[in-house]
Amino acid sequence: MRRAGRTVDTTPSFPGIMIAGACRFWSLTPMPSRELTTPDSLQELDDLIESSREILALQPGWDGEDASSVEESTWERATEFLRRNASILWTKYGRGIESPTLVPVADGSIDLHWNLASHELLINIPPGESQWADYYGDNRQGGSIVKGTLDTKAANHWLFVWLCE
Amino acid sequence: MNWEVEIIPDWDRLYHRVHKTFIKSHGIEPAAFSNRPQGSKSMSVDWEKYAIPQGTRARGRRPAENAVVQFEAGRVRAIPGQRVEHSPDPETGNRAHSDVIGEKSTEVRTQLSRIYELVIPLEQAIEDASE
């Protein structure tokens, strides 16, 4: 099946669902949010968020060098960013996002990393609340580049839409 | 010791320790490639002229928790904003010590994660440490 110039995998993981890039299409048109149930992708994201709590237990020097521990406020900003924008993607576009890896960085920040066949996206959530997140993504061949900084509190679902292209 | 600072050829390899936290089933996360110690403007590597991968791993505080990867110096220099310089360290007796200098933005870390080669996997590091 092909829609609007986008190649779509015709093998649904269950009836009514197709996968393209990092996204899963539950519907070709947006649906009112009151009709929605929690899709698998949001459930997977919730599971990832829950399991990622383990990084809060890392002690200073967790990498055998001088790594900082991850503050709970940083983890909350990262996971809220992820959940909020994935929810917007679902309610506005009927699309679900693949779960990223959520990785602690030695400076106490957190990386959200999508390493997909068609795209790669890395978003770094810094420890300071006033600092913006740094991000970079491309199509793995040096094209379709997105990069810059973003306010994690603002709506940034466009980046997830890009990941679905 | 007063070692001379030398020019590292583009085709030479650089070894870098990677902590187990950054090793996932699909490969090594970009988080492995940051400037250290914190606040530094460079990422430490060892130049193959004076080092072997096993030595790079052994210099870690907990060697068994680290894999070792290698980069080709020229490919690192091709990443915008990155310089590779020999910086021998008499204090630790490490003549191979070198720096990849430049900010490690998400773009740079993504690029570094695409050009490494794994030379000592984590499993082997654990086996060697137990011998």
Image: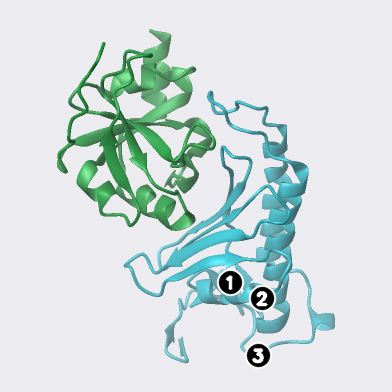
Chain colours: A cyan, B green
Residue A144: percent from left, percent from top: 40, 75
Alpha carbon of mark 2 to alpha carbon of mark 3: how far? Answer: 12 Å
- Check disc 3: other Cα within 10 Å, few if <14, some if 14-19, many if 20+: few
The kind of residue on which mark 1 rests is Phe
Q: Are marks 2 and 1 on the same chain?
A: yes
Question: Mark 2 — on which chain does it sit?
Answer: A
Q: Is B5 on the left-hand or right-hand side of A160?
A: left
Please give the chain letter of the residue carrying mark 1.
A
Residue at disc 3, secondary structure? loop
Say which residue appears at 33% left-offset and 20% top-offset.
B89
Query: Which one is earlier in the sequence, the residue at label 1 or at label 3?
Result: 3
Residue at 53% over, 23% down = A64
Q: Secondary structure at mark 1?
A: helix
Numbered circle sitting on residue A89: 2
| In the image, residue B19 above or below residue A29 | above
For residue A58, what is the image quadrant? top right
Q: Which mark is residue A160?
A: 1
Residue type at mark 2? Leu
Image disc number at residue A37? none
Chain holding disc 3 = A
Q: Which residue does the image show at 41% across and 13% down from the upper left?
A: B129
